[in-house]
């Protein structure tokens, strides 16, 4: 599909079934009227349902230039609701991509109308999560705007470590870090065969 293959060296995995893609987006919670930062959209597998389900604006950050034409077509059809940023997520200042007026105090019971969504390449998922946890601890980056929710995909083994309770054999430093700064929830499990990926690991959101 799209004439582009997922690259093993980038650990890419694409969910090309539109029904499953929409199911995954629904598992993130309501995106209606929200400002969504999407990490690694690839050919737009989740971008489409994010727009279809009512996101006010989607900012899609993609490193792989092969997807630029497809994403630009989507952007042109979105009537200004999709903005594409070509570049490495590790080099982005995400707070600059979130309007200041959407910010909500960390002490507020209300979450900002903003969320981060990503079907992450396996090789960057854990390093990126740790980077975001560091930013949460300092209330910087996208978290300068408040307690911005994260809805992300991980390989099953990583997700199990993230949510491992005390005394669980899989509990590790990643478990402690995630649970110290966030409330973690396992919403959905996908079989790796449902992904367009060089590997067939189970994926969870």
Image: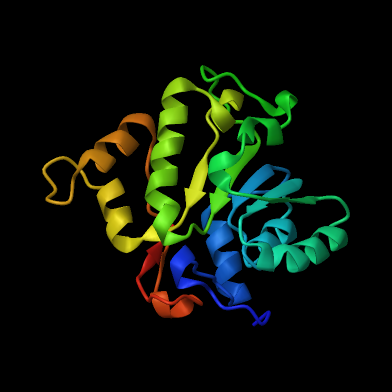
Image point 74% across, 24% down: which residue? 101
174 left or right, relative to 95? left
The residue under the point 61% across, 26% down is 145
Work out whether 203 lies above or below 191: above
* Residue 66 higher or lower than 181, as above or below: below
> For this rendering, which residue is in front, 117 or 129?
129
Residue 158 is drawn in which quadrant?
Answer: bottom left
Quadrant, the C terminus? bottom left
> Where does the image place residue 127, in percent across and percent down from the top left?
39, 45
The residue nearer to you, when weighing 34 against 88, is: 88
Residue found 30% across the figure and 34% down from its top: 177
- The image shows residue 95 at horizontal and vertical percentages of 64, 30
Percent of width and height locating residue 34 = 69, 42
Q: Using residue 157 as the reference point, say whether residue 183 is left or right of it.
A: right
Q: Is residue 11 visible?
A: no
Answer above or below: position of 183 versus 139.
below
Q: Residue at x 37, y 76 (%)?
A: 200
């Amino acid at each position: 599909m799209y004439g582009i293959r997922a690259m093993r060296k980038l650990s890419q995995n694409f969910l090309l079934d539109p029904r499953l893609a929409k199911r995954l987006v629904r598992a993130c919670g309501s995106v209606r009227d929200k400002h969504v930062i999407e990490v690694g959209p690839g050919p737009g597998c989740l971008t489409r349902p994010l727009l279809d389900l009512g996101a006010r604006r989607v900012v899609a950050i993609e490193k792989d230039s092969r997807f630029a034409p497809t994403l630009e077509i989507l952007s042109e059809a979105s009537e200004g609701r999709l903005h594409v940023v070509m570049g490495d997520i590790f080099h982005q200042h995400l707070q600059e991509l979130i309007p200041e007026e959407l910010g909500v105090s960390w002490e507020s019971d209300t979450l900002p109308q903003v969320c981060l969504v990503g079907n992450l390449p396996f090789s960057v998922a854990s390093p990126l999560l740790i980077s975001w946890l560091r930013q949460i601890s300092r209330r910087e980056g996208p978290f300068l705007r408040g307690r911005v929710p994260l809805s992300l995909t991980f390989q099953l083994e990583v997700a199990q470590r993230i949510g491992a309770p005390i005394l669980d054999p899989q509990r590790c430093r990643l478990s402690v870090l995630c649970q110290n700064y966030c409330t973690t929830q396992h919403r959905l499990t996908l079989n790796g065969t449902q992904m367009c990926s060089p590997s067939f690991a189970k994926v969870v959101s």
